[in-house]
Image: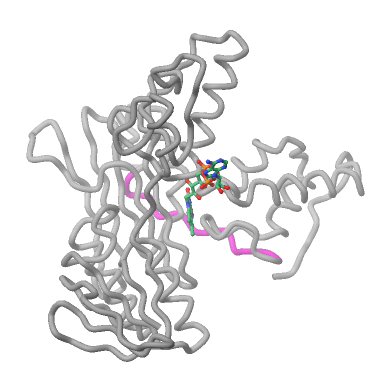
Amino acid sequence: MVIVGGGLLGIELAASLREINVESTVIQRTSRLMNRQLDPLGSQLLQEELADKGVDVYYNDEIERFLGTAAITGIKLKSGLTIHCTTVVIAIGTTPNIEIARESGLECKRGVVVNDYLQTNDPSVFAIGEIAEFKGSLYGITAAAEQQAEIVARYMNGDIAQFYQGSLLMNILKIHGTDLCSLGEVECPDDPAYEEVVFIDKAKRYYKKCIIHNDRLIGAILIGDKNEFLEYRSLIENCIELSEKRLQLLRSGKAAEPVIGKLVCSCNNVGEGNLLNKIQEGCKDHLQLCQLSGAGMGCGSCRPEVKAILEKTLELSPVENKEPRQISA
Ligand SMILES: Cc1cc2nc3c(=O)[nH]c(=O)nc-3n(C[C@H](O)[C@H](O)[C@H](O)COP(=O)(O)OP(=O)(O)OC[C@H]3O[C@@H](n4cnc5c(N)ncnc54)[C@H](O)[C@@H]3O)c2cc1C
């Protein structure tokens, strides 16, 4: 199978196909993978990881022609190379459908332009999620859509004190056996006010890079171990001053809690058993359960499942006076 696009989704698909022994080839227009979410070294380590899994990647190339008549038999690339295949998946990003909004007279650029309350130029019309363009940015992640929805809900209930200030861009690559994520800024600007803290073990494909501005973490890349994702997310989102904790925060390598039972959150590797343990320890609140376990704190798509597990467990057994459950992996 040929996958066009070496972004998050293209890479996740290519690696998943290799797991079920399907040959997969990625065609990437630029000279490196995940060029929007990683720096060059991060892309190189990811390339090595994919090569180990048997994924072929062609860089600086594009499809010129599809081959075949009744069905696809291959593709011809601009470089002249021909690749035989029976399926092509295009994973080159999404573009919001703004035609209706534009025809209705709403201000549109790449998306529907919104202000700090997610209001369009018509104050009775709001836009959130994939379609909303805030200060030139289209976020394209569920966390941003949720944060925007909260601001609109508050505004409609009369709370104008809270306003949208943009969302932290974060990406977690969901490939079995590969830990990779990035948050916020991934390249250090050429400015003495910015600092870079880097740890690297090329042979083990371990790479950790933190970008600091005015003693605050503003971005990170974690490869080989993403246990610090939640902590870094909180440091960045809450603009926490690192001060004397700087070394401890940036140099600690925490041991991951093993996944217990069925995997629920593939962003932060949390199993059903990990959630049940937290509930048995006394956690009864959905958001608190997410924060304590890490489930639902990445892309957020497993939050309904976390909620269902919490509700079912609380319904079946009131948690008071119970010892933590032992569940085997
Ligand atoms: C394959 C894939 C994987 C992703 N993985 C992640 C991830 O791991 N982490 C992450 O944070 N984000 C991820 N995203 C992005 C995430 O899904 C989006 O940011 C999120 O869905 C945005 O929500 P939304 O409601 O704005 O848009 P959508 O979820 O796209 O929903 C828009 C809905 O509106 C409907 N619609 C469109 N036009 C009209 C119309 N004229 N009238 C009525 N209905 C209409 C559409 O049919 C659709 O149902 C992924 C996206 C894709 C495609």
Residue 259 within the magenta-colored segment of the rendering: yes
Observer-nearest residue: 309 or 198?
309
Residue 146's place in the image compared with 61, above or below, is: above
Please name whichever residue, 74 or 203, is drawn nearer the observer in this view of the structure.
74
Foreground residue, 91 or 310?
Answer: 91
Q: Main secondary structure of the magenta part?
A: loop
Question: Residue at point 26% right, 65% down?
Answer: 33
Q: Quick one: quadrant of the N terminus?
A: bottom left
Q: Which residue is painted at 41% across and 61% down in the image?
A: 225
Residue 86 place in picture, x, y as percent:
42, 87
Q: Is residue 32 left or right of residue 171?
A: left
Which residues are drawn in magenta?
250-261
* Residue at image location 54% in from the left, 22% down from the top: 152
- Colour mode of the rendering: one colour
Horizontal arrangement in the rendering, residue 317 relative to residue 72 (left or right): right
The image position of residue 204, as x and y in percent, is 31, 73
Residue 159 appears at what percent x and percent y? 56, 10
Image quarter (top left, top right, bottom left or bottom right) of the C terminus: bottom right
**Above or below for 43 versus 248:** below
Image position of 48 (left or right of 12): left
Please identify the quarter of the rendering in which residue 38 is found. bottom left
The reply to whether the magenta stretch includes residue 190 is no
